[in-house]
């Protein structure tokens, strides 16, 4: 398994060596205030060009990107943000960290936010929607955006696991008001840690910069977009030059890796074939799927567990790349605790966990993930590997479905 982490090589090493020789590890300057080599800025430009957006900002992680984006949107105490219950820890905690309340929604058979949940969950306090493009597949954006526009809600696209995925020919991250990406070890490209915020909004860009850099707005950013926002107390989520250097080298590897992974997926699925009771995850735009994690559903939870055990015995792991869980199963959600009790967006909800934060509140998602099987394919897999995985699934699953 593995994506960008499997492809680390000479190009990354050369870039890092250049930064070390130059001595400017900080993105803005080095010894004696000499300019850096500008790798972070180059990575921002590459991301902006790929997505046909004007503004891109490198930050220290995908989690930082979420907090920066939410801060740019002005999220704070008293606000509510709708997000899928099946999502990574940071999606929930980033909202809580800003004092707002995460409102959990069911997912549908895309494993992303069910658009119908937006109408059900919107209240006068709802500010926006956090859409997660889960594991290389775009969420079903057209109905989500239609609901959001009708409700006058902003949309934040979390593309942490889906750099390069598209929806009807257009890159994810370009549909909403602002988008976030991650360059953590297990992502499409990696710099160990790192992230990116993308937007077409000038005001959102400036606010994101100030949120990420102690409220500052340096000359490099003023040259991209003149200042127009009053400075406010920001945090420090800057991306360093060493991470930028690795990211720049990794970025060139994305198109061929995606082509390879899509080819592997087709080979694997062809070898699995058609089996009664096996239903593949619905992909709103099959042409835009990255191909590294394919999911299917079986009729029962017991069958899914049995298949995973039988495949593992033959050396085929059917666990996903990501450690995603339902938010209600996380300790921080079960406790409802924050770093300061008076800062909690859950204050006054008694008993806790309250409605909307318990397993029984999400029967559809719980059922789907219980019957779900992941088929991970890595960047170093061969066509023979993909065919073998497909055959093992077919041979071990057929008797379970008989």
Image (spheres, grey):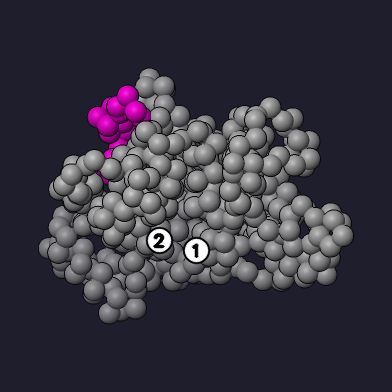
One can see residue 202 in this view: no
> Which quarter of the rendering shows the C terminus?
bottom left
- Disc 1 target residue: 186
**Of residues 340 and 24, the one drawn nearer to the viewer in this rendering:** 340
Q: Look at 34% across and 73% down and name the residue there.
A: 316
Q: What secondary structure characterizes most of the magenta part?
A: loop
One can see residue 230 in this view: yes
> In the rendered structure, which segment of residues is drawn in magenta?
105-126
Q: CA distance from mark 2 to mark 1?
A: 8 Å
Give the side of residue 361 with respect to residue 46, left or right.
left
- Disc 2 target residue: 322
Query: Is 223 included in the stretch rendered in magenta?
Result: no
First along the sequence among labels 2 and 1 = 1
Disc 1 packing (10 Å; few <14; some 14–19; many ≥20): many
Q: Look at 68% across and 47% down and name the residue there.
A: 44
Q: Look at 40% across and 30% down and name the residue there.
A: 127
């Amino acid at each position: 398994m593995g994506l960008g982490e499997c492809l680390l090589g000479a190009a990354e090493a050369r870039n890092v060596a250049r930064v070390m020789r130059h001595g400017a590890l900080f993105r803005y300057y080095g010894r004696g205030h000499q300019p850096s080599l500008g790798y972070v800025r180059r990575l921002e430009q590459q991301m902006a060009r790929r997505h046909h957006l004007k503004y891109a900002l490198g930050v220290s992680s995908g989690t930082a990107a979420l907090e920066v984006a939410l801060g740019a949107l002005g999220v704070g105490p008293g606000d509510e943000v709708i997000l899928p219950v099946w999502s990574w820890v940071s999606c929930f905690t980033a909202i809580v960290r800003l004092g707002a309340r995460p409102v959990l929604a069911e997912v549908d058979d895309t494993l992303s936010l069910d658009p119908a949940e937006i109408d059900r969950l919107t209240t006068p306090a709802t500010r926006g929607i956090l859409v997660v493009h889960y594991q290389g597949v775009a969420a079903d954006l057209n109905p989500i955006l239609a609901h959001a526009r009708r409700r006058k809600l902003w949309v934040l696209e979390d593309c942490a696991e889906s750099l390069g995925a598209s929806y009807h020919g257009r890159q994810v991250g370009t549909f909403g008001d602002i988008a976030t990406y991650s360059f953590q070890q297990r992502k499409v490209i990696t710099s160990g840690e790192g992230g990116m915020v993308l937007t077409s909004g000038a005001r959102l860009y400036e606010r994101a910069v100030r949120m990420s850099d102690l409220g500052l707005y340096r000359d490099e950013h003023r040259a991209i977009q003149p200042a127009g926002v009053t400075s406010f107390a920001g945090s420090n989520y800057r991306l360093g030059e060493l991470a930028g250097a690795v990211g720049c080298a990794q970025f060139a590897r994305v198109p061929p890796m995606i082509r390879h992974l899509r080819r592997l997926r087709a080979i694997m699925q062809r070898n699995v074939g058609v089996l009664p009771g096996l239903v593949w995850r619905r992909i709103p735009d099959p042409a835009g799927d990255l191909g590294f994690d394919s999911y299917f559903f079986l009729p029962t939870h017991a069958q899914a567990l049995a298949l995973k055990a039988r495949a593992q015995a033959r050396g085929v792991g059917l666990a996903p790349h990501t450690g995603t869980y339902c938010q209600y199963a996380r300790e921080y959600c079960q406790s409802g605790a924050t770093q300061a009790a008076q800062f909690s967006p859950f204050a006054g909800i008694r008993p806790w966990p309250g409605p909307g934060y318990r397993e029984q509140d999400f029967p559809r998602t719980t059922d789907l993930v219980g019957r779900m099987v992941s088929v991970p394919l890595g960047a170093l897999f061969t066509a023979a590997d993909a065919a073998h995985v497909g055959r093992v699934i077919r041979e071990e699953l057929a008797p379970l479905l008989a």
